[in-house]
Structures are given as structure tokens and as C-alpha cells.
Image: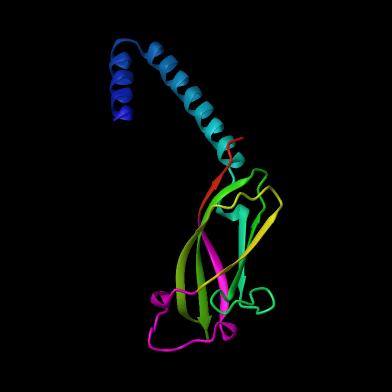
Amino acid sequence: MGWLIGGAIVLIIFLFSRRASAVVVALLAVAWVGFWLATDRKSEQEPSNQSVSISANSDPQLCPNPDMPVSVRITNHADRALETVSFSLVAKQRNSIVYRASHTSGEAIAPGDTFSTCYGLNPLSFAIRTVRYDPRELDWTGETSLTRFASP
């Protein structure tokens, strides 16, 4: 809507004075370039989901409790503290996804630090609920979906 109004104003100014419309178009171009540069720099400064890595495995040494067999490591690669991360815990067997569950961690993780914890399995998150899977025989991964970082 703003572009339509701006175009109409430039057209009206063009009908009265071509020189004035050229000045208005030049000012709009400078404003647009300034806005583009400002938003581009801001997006470079914002950490993203790629600033967080999540690894998961089912190592009985890391998680000896059979009710919580999956170890998850969340690493913050950003230059700001990670406040919240939402992720999917995924298990594959022979390249087929057999388990997917969503989790959220509210653990504050400083820049460069790692947080590890153990998770239990939700029986409703298995693709085939009638089959009993051994968590140690599955290939586990974590997929980051949302992140929230501390304000600069």
C-alpha cells in the first residue's frame, strides 16, 4: 500500500515538475538504500538457528537411567547467551525415521558453552507404536527449530 501511495505522489509531482519528481525519486532511492543497508547489517548481527548445534546419542555411559536413554548436547556457537532452544529429537533405523519428538530447553547457555542432559522417550512419538525399538540400535540426531538469544 505504501508503494502505491508513494508512486501516486511521484506521478502527481511529475505532472507538475519533472525536476521536482527527479529529486523526489533520488531521495526515495537514497532512503531505500539506507534502509536496506541498515537491515542487512542487523541480520548479520543476529544469531540464527545455525548458531546452535545439537547432537544426540544413546550411550549408556552418558545416560545410565533406562527411562532416559538419550543424551542430548546443545552447543551455543553464537556470541550471545542462548536463553531457549526448541528442537526435534529424531531417530532413524536404516535411513527411515522411526522416532520424532519436539523438545524445548530453557537452560541458559553462555557463548561457546555446551549443555548436556538425558531425555526419555515418548511412546507416542514412534512411527510404528507396536514395535519395540532398542534406543542403542538407532541413529539419533537433533534438529534445531527455534532459538531465543539474550538481548545485546
Chosen colour scheme: rainbow
View extreme (bottom): residue: 131
Query: On the image, which quarter does residue 128 sit in?
Result: bottom left
User: Is residue 139 one of those drawn in magenta?
Assistant: yes
View extreme (right): residue: 112
At horizontal 61% and vertical 35% (from top left) the residue drawn is: 152
Q: Is residue 11 above or below residue 78?
A: above
Q: Is residue 120 above or below residue 19?
A: below
User: Is residue 77 one of those drawn in magenta?
Assistant: no
In this view, the residue in front, 53 or 85, is 85
In this view, the residue in front, 126 or 43, is 126
Q: Is residue 12 left or right of residue 64?
A: left
In this view, the residue in front, 59 or 147, is 59
Query: On the image, which quarter does residue 46 sit in?
Result: top right
In this view, the residue in front, 147 or 115, is 115
Q: Position of residue 98 (x, y in %)?
A: 46, 80
Q: Is residue 63 above or below residue 83?
A: below
Q: How many marks?
A: 0
In the picture, which quadrant includes the N terminus? Answer: top left
Q: Is residue 18 left or right of residue 151?
A: left
Q: Position of residue 132 (x, y in %)?
A: 46, 88
At horizontal 47% and vertical 20% (from top left) the residue drawn is: 26
Q: Position of residue 62 (x, y in %)?
A: 68, 73
At horizontal 59% and vertical 84% (from top left) the residue drawn is: 136
Query: On the image, which quarter does residue 58 sit in?
Result: bottom right
Range of residues picked out in magenta:
121-145
Q: Position of residue 16 (x, y in %)?
A: 30, 10
